[in-house]
Structures are given as C-alpha cells and as structure tokens.
Amino acid sequence: MEEFVGWLNGVLWHDYFIYTILGVGLLFSILTRFVQVRHIKDMFVLMFKGKSSEAGVSSFQALSIALAGRVGTGNIAGVATAIAFGGPGAVFWMWTIAFIGSASAFIESTLAQIYKVKQKGQYRGGPAFYIEKGMGVKWFAYLFAFAALIAMAILMPGVQSNSIATAVDNAFSIPSWVTGLIIIVLLAIIIFGGVKRIATAAQVIVPFMAIAYILLSFIIVLINITEVPAIISLIVRSAFAMDSAFGGIVGMAIAWGVKRGIYSNEAGQGTGAHPAAAAEVSHPAKQGLVQAASVYIDTLLVCSATAFMILFTGMYNTYEEQGDSLESSTYIVENVSGVEHGPAYTQEAIDTVFPGFGSAFVAIALFFFAFTTIMAYYYIAETNVAYMLGNRNGTIAMNILKLVLLGTTMYGAVQTADLAWALGDVGLGIMVWLNVIAIIILVKPALITLKDYERQKKQGLDPVFDPKALGIKNADFWEHEYNKDTGSEAEKKTV
C-alpha cells in the first residue's frame, strides 16, 4: 500500500507539475495585472461587507469556511515538514506560491460565483459547476466531483486527525484512539447541523485561534529581535542555493515549499471555490477578492508564524537524503534529537521560550485548526455529492457521506503520520491537476468579470453583475434568480 501510494505521489507531484503550478499562478498574476496587489485594500474591506441570507452566507462566513479548510495541520505540521526536507529555503517558496497563488484563488472563486446555482434553496458552486456550465463538458465535471469526494471524504481527513492525535499524545499522553473518538463526536454534532452551523462554528473558532497563534509567534520574534536579519537572510540564501549548508537541496526547497504551500493555502486546488460560491454578494469579483485575501492570511501570516517560531529558536532538523521515509537518513542540520518532524518542532520551539507550554499550546491550536479543516472538507464533499445528485433526493447519500468522513477521520487518527500525509498528497494532487486544467481554459470569463468590477468601481458604483451584458453564457443564477430575489441596482433606480 505504502509503495503504491509513494509511486502515485511521484507521478502526481513530479517536478514538471511543481513548476506548472508556479507558472499558472504567475500567468494569472500577469493576466489580472497582479490583482492581488492592485486591489489589496478591497480584498480586506469586502470581507466584512455583506450579510447572509436564507440561501447563502455572508462574505466573512464564506471566508471563514475557506480559511477553515486552509488553516489546518499544513500550517503547523506542514511547515515543519517543509523545513525538515527542504531547509529554511522552503519557507521562501511557500511565500512565493502564496503571492502568485492568490491570483489563482481569485480566478477560481470568481468562476464559482459566476456559475453558482440555487439548489433546494441553497447556493452551491465550485469546480464541478463551472466546468459543466463554463466548459460544457459534463463528464469532466463529474470526474472532478468524484475526485473531490474521494479526496475530501476519504484521503485527506486523516492528515488532520492524525496531526491532532499526535500533538495531543505528545502534550497530554492521551491515546490516539481516545482523541479520535472525541474528534468524531464533536464533528458529528456540527456536520449534522448543516452548512449554517459549519459557517457559524468556523467564523468563531478560526479567527480566535489564528490571532492567538500569530500573537505567540510575534512574542517569540520580539524576544529574538536581533536575529531577524540573519533569519531572513538564511531563508533567502537557502532558497537560491547561496547558503553553504543548504545549497545542495535547493530543488527540494522549491518542491517542498510549493507542495506544502499548496497543501496549506489550497490556491488552485478548487477547495476554496466551494464556500466562495455560497456567499451572498452582488458581483462575483467581490468574493473572488475576498478569497484571494484568504491565501495571504493562511500563508503570509499563519504559516510564517510557524516558520519563524521554528527558525528563530533553531528547533529543527534538515535531512540530507530526501523522501518521506527517514530510515538511514543523514542530517544537514541536527538541532533536536529524538523528535519526529512535524508538530513536535513547533512544540519544542515554544518550549524554549515558555518551558512546559509548547506541547499543550500546539496541541490545542492544532486541534482547533485541524478540526475546522475537517468541517470544511465535509462541506466541500457535500457540495460535490449535491452536484452529482442534482435535484434528486439526497438524504440517504448525505448521511452515508457523513458516516464515511467520520470513519476516515477516526482511521487517520490511529495511523502512522507518513501514510496519512502520503494519502493526503494523493487526494490533493488529483484535485489540483483537474482544477488547474479547468481554470486555465475558463480564465476569460473571470477576466471579463474583473474588468467589469473595476469599470463600475471607477464610476463610483457598487458593482452589480449582469452576465448577458458581458457576453457570459450559462450564468443562470445571475440571469434569473438574482434579479428575481433581490432586484438589480438598475431596476431599483428605475423604480
């Protein structure tokens, strides 16, 4: 099993794919004229505007669900793993993929809004929907929906629950199976309550834990403030093979930085597009900008917090022989002994400044980060089941989905970390491949929508979307449902 999973990851995450993801993000950045820089003010202002409705959630709630999916074990364990295998230079490439990936997040989330539908009184959208409506290729849409269902419900929840169980065991010596049971009981209470309960839980938990985590990192940086120039220099030099210790693994720095960066911020993966479609907004570009901001929050803030805590305290090892199995590996840097790469690096880092506090804090942070990520996984899986079912009654299918996700979450909690991460990488790789192909083909409607948003903003208007006027076809919700439910701004002015 492990050999097959390793082989499949080798195919999905080959070097050519790593550079393709970087190239796609750069292409979208150029095509949008670096929307992630030009509209950075709008990105953060819009997230606090808009209200939820019976059919949809507010921009902030949609952002919270997306962040719940993004801010997870990848921000703690993933960053530590990237440093272990790629050295400090991997952090630079995580920043890079976040910066250019935010343009990819804008494109996919804008497309999700353009082609969203109102299904059984609730907004639904995401790659499967925009593949069918935008590309007109239904089999490809079903392929993505099936791949997303397998990834979100079976392959990826175990990564989150495994990291929680490992951290809790390290901190409190609680057996993994006990932690697994606690996770699935709490998870069941939330996911059986529907998307509104998921959104409510996410908007409370995610900001609170993210702020607490970043503040702790800031304190550690302040304590080591004199080391700031040296650490920033180390990151940059290691990223470009200019450091004598890490120069020989620059390829691994890029690979692990991009892989773990994508795993954390999910830009281009298509996951963030699902909650983006559920937002109640007057123009698709609005939520596209909000979702682009979520990539910054995830990587430039939360991931950087982990990286700085580890690097400023020196609590990490970097391995010379690369791979997921560390048997017979030698070290480039060995600063901590008897500690497995992952959450333990962050725990050790905090303990150096606050003795006895690190293990407990990281365990609690990981619990909330990873737990909300599994919640987001369920929502994404549910959306793709809803797509495949259409208007058919899906009560039984949804209940089966809930039970499957609870089972795989429990299974992941008691498995080895290496297998859990390898399975997660398979799920991630398949989704990214399919979604990247789709958004490259469908970039034109997103660019037209961005130009329309900018034109209306220059005129001093609150942008409202009219797909017919822009020549965008099959945006059925905006052509029929939006005006029927709320009335367009033009109609209101006429009245």
Image (cartoon, rainbow, N blue to C red):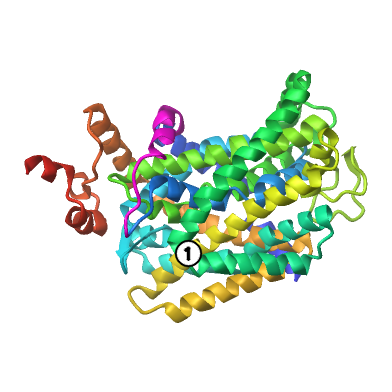
The quadrant of the image that shows the N terminus is bottom right
Q: Position of residue 290 (x, y in %)?
A: 43, 41
Q: Is residue 425 left or right of residue 385?
A: right
Whether residue 466 is situated above or below residue 197 in the rendered picture? above
Q: Is residue 200 left or right of residue 214?
A: left
Q: Position of residue 93 (x, y in %)?
A: 65, 36
Q: Residue at x 70, y 69 (%)?
A: 181
Whether residue 357 is situated above or below residue 390 in the rendered picture? above
Q: Quadrant of residue 2?
A: bottom right
> Residue 128 versus residue 66: which sits nearer the camera?
66
Query: The magenta stretch spans which residues?
Result: 36-54
Q: Quadrant of residue 476?
A: bottom left
For the residue carrying disc 1, how many other residues have a C-alpha within 10 Å: few (<14), some (14-19), or many (20+)? many
Q: Is residue 353 left or right of residue 413?
A: right
Q: Residue at x 44, y 30 (%)?
A: 40
Secondary structure state at the residue bearing disc 1: helix
Residue 2 appearing in the image:
no
Q: Position of residue 360 (x, y in %)?
A: 77, 48
> Residue 349 versus residue 296: which sits nearer the camera?
349
Q: Amino acid at mark 1?
A: Phe
Whether 177 is among the magenta residues is: no
Residue that carries the numbered disc 1 in the rendered image: 144
